[in-house]
Amino acid sequence: RHARLVSDWSSDVCSSNLVGCVAIIKGSSVPVLFYQVMGTHNQQTLKAAEDNVVKQRQTAAASMQNAAKTGDDVVTAAKEVAENPDSKAVSKLDQTVSTYMKNVDQASRQREGYDARVATLREEIQYAEEHWSEIIEKMTDPAIKQEHQRTHDRMMRSLQRKLQSVEKELHTFDVALARAANAELAAESLKQYAVMGTLAGKLDGFVFQVREANSAMTHAANALLATLHTDDNVTEVAG
């Protein structure tokens, strides 16, 4: 996946026509050329990983919003059954509960997709940390070495902040899904009560659970979207 930026990088890469690479290590003052020559592949894959996280974050937020909306639909349908428990109302409740469960399951899959893309980003960050540190260590000019170390440290701090933010998002996502799972169980029970005509006295508890789940899912979606709107791509600092 990556360029061969390992311990033998100088012989592998710098022995080619990339004389700028050798010049940097020997103390040239063209850091941009160095990063372009040695970092293009890693910078591209790192940026791609960041972009994929952003895209999946948006998709995950939309799935949460959709699940919360259908949760509201279930509450409405349940209230209609309580007011008029005919077969049409019961059928509508059954359909809305099925849709709700389907959308919660979709949100869960989007969470898994988000986690997978975050794992890829985490790998890219680890790769950059390990290999760029190794490359910078080989620089012989103290001023240039210090300049690149500062640039590298700034990029790593920003990326680590992103990962910390993502971990909080995933936790918020998991809390919402756990509450949605409880609401799903309650909805299944409510369907049975509606069919048997024994819904009386059970609606309030169900509505509370669904609304609690909806609130958690809406909160998770808003957290994802808030991060999306403030997200900044930090790979450019190395370019």
Image (cartoon, rainbow, N blue to C red):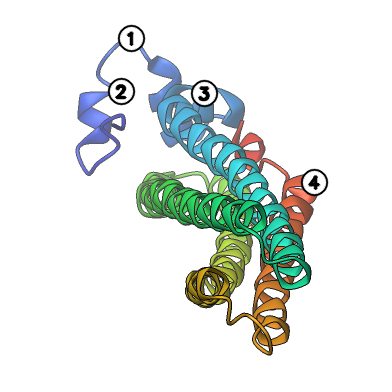
Count the numbered circles shown.
4
Q: Is residue 126 left or right of residue 49?
A: left
Residue 36 disc label:
3
- Residue at 61% x, 71% y: name it: 172
Instruction: Mark 1 or mark 4: name the one nearer the start of the chain.
Output: 1
Q: Check disc 1 and report the residue beneath it.
A: 17
Can you give x and y, in whole percent of width and height, for residue 82 in the image?
Answer: 73, 73
SS under mark 1: loop
Q: Above or below — where is 87 with respect to 235?
A: below
User: Which one is closest to the eye, mark 2 or mark 3?
Assistant: 3
How far across and down, in percent of the image, does residue 108 sit?
A: 47, 57
Q: Position of residue 45 (x, y in %)?
A: 44, 32
Which numbered circle lies on residue 174? none
Report the disc number at residue 14: 2
What whole-number distance in Å separates the C-alpha atoms at marks 1 and 3?
14 Å
Q: Residues within 10 Å of mark 1 (few under 14, many from 20)?
A: few
Instruction: State the separation of the CA atoms marked 2 and 1.
Output: 7 Å
Q: Using a 10 Å C-alpha cutoff, classify the residue at mark 4 as few (fewer than 14 neighbours), some (14 to 19) or many (20 or more).
A: few
Picture disc at residue 229: 4
Is there any visible trace of residue 221 in the rendered image?
yes
List x then y, in percent, for residue 174: 52, 70
